[in-house]
Amino acid sequence: MGAFDYQKVKEPRYFQEGRMEAHSDHPYYASAEDAEEKVCVFTESLNGLWKFHYARNYNSAIQGFETEEYNCRNWEDIRVPAHIQMEGYDVPQYANTQYPWEGHEEIQPGEIPENFNPVASYVKYFEVPEHMKGRRLFISFQGAESGLALWLNGHFVGYSEDTFTPSEFELTEYVKEGENKLAAQVFKWTSSSWCEDQDFYRFSGIYRDVYLYTVPDVHIRDLRIRAIPDETLTRGTLEIRTEAWGQGKALVCLSKDGRTFEGEYDLDKGGLTMEIENPALWSAEEPQLYDLTIQIYDQDGNLQEYIPERVGFRRFEIKDHIMTLNGKRIVFKGVNRHEFSSVSGRHVSEEELIKDLKTMKQNNINAIRTCHYPDASPLYRLCDEYGLYLIDETNLESHGSWDTVEETGDISGVVPCDRPEWLDMMLDRANSMYQRDKNHPAVLIWSCGNESFGGKDIFEMSQFFRKEDPTRLVHYEGVFHDRRYNDTSDIESQMYTSVENIKKFLEKDRSKPFICCEYTHAMGNSCGAMYKYTDLTDTEPLYQGGFIWDYIDQTLYKKDRYGKEFQAYGGDFRERPTDYEFSANGIAHGGERNPSPKMQEVKFNYQNITVQVGAGEVKVINKNLFVNTNTFNCLVTVERDGKIIRRAGLETDVEPLSEKTYALPVPQETRPGEYAVTVAFLLKEDKVWAAAGHEVAFGQYVYSVQAEKKKSAKKIEVIRSTHNIGVKGENFEVIFSGLNGGLASYKYGGKEMIEAIPKPNFWRAPTDNDNGNFMPARYGQWKIASLYATHKDYRENTYAKIIKPELEVKENTAKVTFTYLLPTRPVSQCQLSYEVDGEGKVTAVLSYDPVKELGDMPEFGVMFKLNADYDHLEWYGLGPAETYADRQKGAKLGIYRNLVKDNMAAYVVPQECGAKAGVRYAKVTDRKGRGMLFEMDEKSGPMMFSALPYTPHEMENARHPYELPEVHYTVVRAALGQMGIAGDDSWGSPTHPEFLLNTEGKMEFAFSFKGI
């Protein structure tokens, strides 16, 4: 082979040289015993320390380093696999639509950055292991970003692009006895980088496994398995096709649950077909897998290799414009999942991967879209085993090349579009993904890529998939923007389309099934009104679900200037350009990969059993396609005022896609109190992803038996002073300040309970969605009103006159009412009254006559500051995770406890969080259990409540958690309600109107508080 020519790296037609043809990812071993122990004598890992040199560009790289004569032993060490940006070279850069070089170099497709385009030079000295000598020798790079040139002992071996599928080369010709010098250069940006403009962190380097491998004298190079039931689902066809090196025969054995099917064929025949009666069918609900073994023998009858595989029989197709799996209409309850680790970027450990998949299954997620590239191979095997459907997506996104097309109409700069020079690269990427992943039953759909407009090249990719694999469907969302090749996608796929617009589209066009390949944008405190989408799957057959954007926050561990670790987002590495916190859109946090509070709602909306509990009965709607409810335990729990009083089992037998109504095995209660009847379905036995007893679905019914209300008969003493009004009782003392305008003191048991005068509050720290839809600009007057509400009338002269509080004394209570002017335009006002009884209980009422010009507000309530020692919270309301008007369906009514600091959700940018809807009471106490009790009032009903270490204004001022001040207070907000947190998208979609506060008539919020 000739010499490597760097100038070709910028040419789209040059994307590989000397690379082996793509093939299946099947394992192979020397024997069944080796397969059992997963010990492969044919492979040798090269992971570990390599010699390394970093250069800012190609001209700064060391020329000739790859020769045998050049000594690289004094170079620095670097670990492989790893991104160089995670090992101290260059910095991670997060960018969404824009290309990462924009503003630095002005280049066009067909050009690559020259001034700054890091080159990573790697060297590995190795000796061929004794047991591998005398055989053909190959090397596999499972992933290198974005272009890889390779030499062995000074000889140019080959070149490859496509960051996300294996690049393999034969080394046999260049290997020698003794020590060998393997040299590689990895270029951060190549011509292919124009098609790798995904919404992710930009890294480079050898970031997936590297290993040497040999093959036996007779070897299956490529294996294709198709296990397809017929239309009756009573007979399955197992088709095995192999491409072999060498002559011999294959013995095939398929087995499951004691049933065995055997066959054999000569390798030159290329495979065999077996018929299986009544095959067990694979699905996400029941991931039934067969064990397949293929033993390869040479012509003398010697075993050459042993191939173990798992096989799933399933039939996936479109029937009457609807996607069906094994004859049933499928609904995707999915997520988009970037391969991402806060520790190591796109090199995700096995432990992290398994945690992700277990968390998904535990929260009723049944599908993954690999956004927007093929993942490392272990994902696919685990999805086969755990039961997760996959949209396998080709490594393609060119968003930055076309996002202005709708404004300009000019498609000349779009790649790949109709450009012939990009076609072969695109087909190569499609082929590499297909060949590697074709045997996995979890893969239902091939995707041509993401957000790359339209055109002939992508259409040809879709045709490649159809030609190679008629057993799956083809997906591509981008035709939404360019309908010239509408048949590129078998599915109508759209992003962030509202439910109403989905309905409108399907009224006009019912030619294809419809999915949202991205929806309910989970940035920060989000996923409001998600249920509207999942409810639509029940009423519109052609709408078959969606994939949340996205699964995990793309954030990286970093330390602030004081050495404290935090989760860094775009821009935190001082990289520019960047798209800042848009890297964090997950329903799982970065770092420990734990579910965010949003997951509670996702789990409920995605549950496969709908449980409608009513008075004395429960309707069970089984949305599973293949599983009867009798495979779960059903548990009925009754709570009285949050405390469990009864438990009972309920036998159910609801066939898939059926419903039944059952009488509850518990009596209707008559004692006074509030009752919550919860019916839950639990795993009967351990699964690979959860233990027995894990809850998969629930429903809850709440009812009350009224009790007679008692009023306090204890006397109070009222003290009238010039500037203050005092109210005393047996264990308490209250002071209302006319001078300072509010409740200045509340002492209980001789101890002052409040740190500042409570004030009306109309504001929340804006969420990411709020910022995206300009809520702060639209509602900004309410922030000012919250900060600067005053009891002084400043309108008539410079010396503001105090608006005196009103005092009303009754038999055993005293009521003080303050009027606050709100500095809005036009000026508005509200009243906050406090009625104190002889127990020390204070009933507060906030009232406001809406001013039409001002509209609604983010929140309507009262904010308190307590001492930070009151850091324990107990509430009787919805939980356990935070809840909002448009995100509370997944919550249960109950008694919950945590620490105040725990209510600060780990959103990467501080924002509104920790609210609890439907609160009957909340206790905020110190570690001794002393503090304040807040209770709902019958007039207003259950309240929204939060207890946080910070005010909304403090949270709003911080761009990172480490920018928040030291904790001095526990900030309590009791509210009539708060506007929903929205989430159809994070760049314009507002809160749905029904989840805004109602300002049609007088607003009034009543609640009480008392020392404990």
Image (cartoon, rainbow, N blue to C red):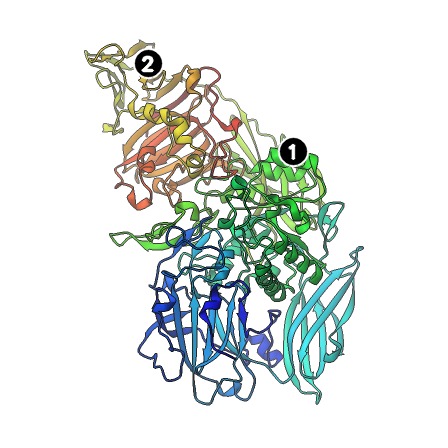
Q: Nearer the viewer, residue 266 or 917?
A: 266
- Residue 459 locus on image (x, y percent): 65, 54
Q: Is residue 1 above or below residue 920?
A: below
- Residue 518 locus on image (x, y percent): 55, 45
- Residue 756 locus on image (x, y percent): 25, 27
Task: Indicate the secondary structure of the residue bearing disc 2.
Answer: strand
Task: Indicate the secondary structure of the residue bearing disc 1.
Answer: helix
Relative to 556, is 789 on the left or the right? Answer: left
Which mark is drawn over residue 853? none
Determine the CA span between mark 1 and mark 2: 55 Å
Residue 585 seen from this side? yes
Q: Nearer the viewer, residue 853 or 443?
A: 853
Residue type beneath disc 2: Lys
- Residue 357 locus on image (x, y percent): 53, 56
Which quadrant of the structure image shows residue 312? bottom right
Q: Residues within 10 Å of mark 1 (few under 14, many from 20)?
A: few
Residue at image coords 72%, 75%: 252
Residue type beneath disc 1: Lys
Q: Is residue 714 above or below residue 252?
A: above
Relative to 395, is 237 on the left or the right? Answer: right
Q: Residues within 10 Å of mark 2 (few under 14, many from 20)?
A: some
**Label 1 vs label 2, nearer the camera:** 1
Residue 81 seen from this side? no
Identify the residue under disc 2: 815
How many marks are shown on the rendered structure? 2
Relative to 544, is 229 on the left or the right? Answer: right
Which of the two labelled residues, at mark 1 and mark 2, occupies the earlier sequence position?
1
Give the quarter of the figure containing the C terminus.
top left
Q: Is residue 796 above or below residue 757?
A: above
Identify the residue under disc 1: 504
Residue at image coords 50%, 38%: 983
